[in-house]
């Protein structure tokens, strides 16, 4: 995620010599990215979710997008769903089985979703000044708050 530069693709096969391979201006502010298969799923700020075909890294192609109601700040893909940390709009769950036509299927209002990681049936959300939120996403159409923990200001979260 390259911020105002959009999606930036870098070859790091030689860590001492990273090479810019390709990029795509997403028109928003690329704040988070998750790669799964031939696609990069970009949390693109006010533009929501942007889906890019990266099967040819030197020529990334925008194939789909979904304008969310908030500011997409983080994204995690698990199975057929993209989980979007959508700022003041909370957690947004999107069916991505058809990358050219992503469809929002679920939503849970949290105060300030900044980042998200999914493991099994749970989404773990860094929720800004509200701390840490755990959400049961076993039914993506009906996410349920399991617990939360007030802990300073959380901006990011990583693997479990």
Image (cartoon, rainbow, N blue to C red):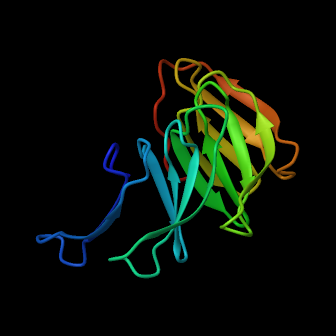
Number of on-image labels:
0
Left/right placement of residue 104 relative to residue 10 reads right
Determine whether 98 is above or below 152 in the image.
below
Task: Write the residue at 37% across / 76% down.
Answer: 59
Q: Position of residue 133 (x, y in %)?
A: 66, 31
Left/right placement of residue 95 relative to residue 39 reads right
Left/right placement of residue 67 relative to residue 31 reads right
Task: Write the residue at 87% across / 51% down.
Answer: 139
Task: Write the residue at 69% across / 37% down.
Answer: 91
Q: Where is residue 53 in the image (x, y as percent from the top left)?
A: 51, 72
Determine whether 62 is above or below 82 in the image.
below
Quadrant of the rendered image containing residue 25: bottom left
Q: Where is residue 36 in the image (x, y as percent from the top left)?
A: 55, 70
Q: Between 25 and 131, which is closer to the camera in this rendering?
A: 25
Left/right placement of residue 115 relative to residue 118 reads left
Q: Between 75 and 118, which is closer to the camera in this rendering?
A: 75
Determine whether 17 is above or below 105 in the image.
below
Determine whether 55 is above or below 115 in the image.
below
Q: Between 56 and 19, which is closer to the camera in this rendering?
A: 56
Q: Between 14 and 38, which is closer to the camera in this rendering?
A: 38
Outermost residue to the bottom:
56
Q: Position of residue 66 (x, y in %)?
A: 65, 50
């Amino acid at each position: 995620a390259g911020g105002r530069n959009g999606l930036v693709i870098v070859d790091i096969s030689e860590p001492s010599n990273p090479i810019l391979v390709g990029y795509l201006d997403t028109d928003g502010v690329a704040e988070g990215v998750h790669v799964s298969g031939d696609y990069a799923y970009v949390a693109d700020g006010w533009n929501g979710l942007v889906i890019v075909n990266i099967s040819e890294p030197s020529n990334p192609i925008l194939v789909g997008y979904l304008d969310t109601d908030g500011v997409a700040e983080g994204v995690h893909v698990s199975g057929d769903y993209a989980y979007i940390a959508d700022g003041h709009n909370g957690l947004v769950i999107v069916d991505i089985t058809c990358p050219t036509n992503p469809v929002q299927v679920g939503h849970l209002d949290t105060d300030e979703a900044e980042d998200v990681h999914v493991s099994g049936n749970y989404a773990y959300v860094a929720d800004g000044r509200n701390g840490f939120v755990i959400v049961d996403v076993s039914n993506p159409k009906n996410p349920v708050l399991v617990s939360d923990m007030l802990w300073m200001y959380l901006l990011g979260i990583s693997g479990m």
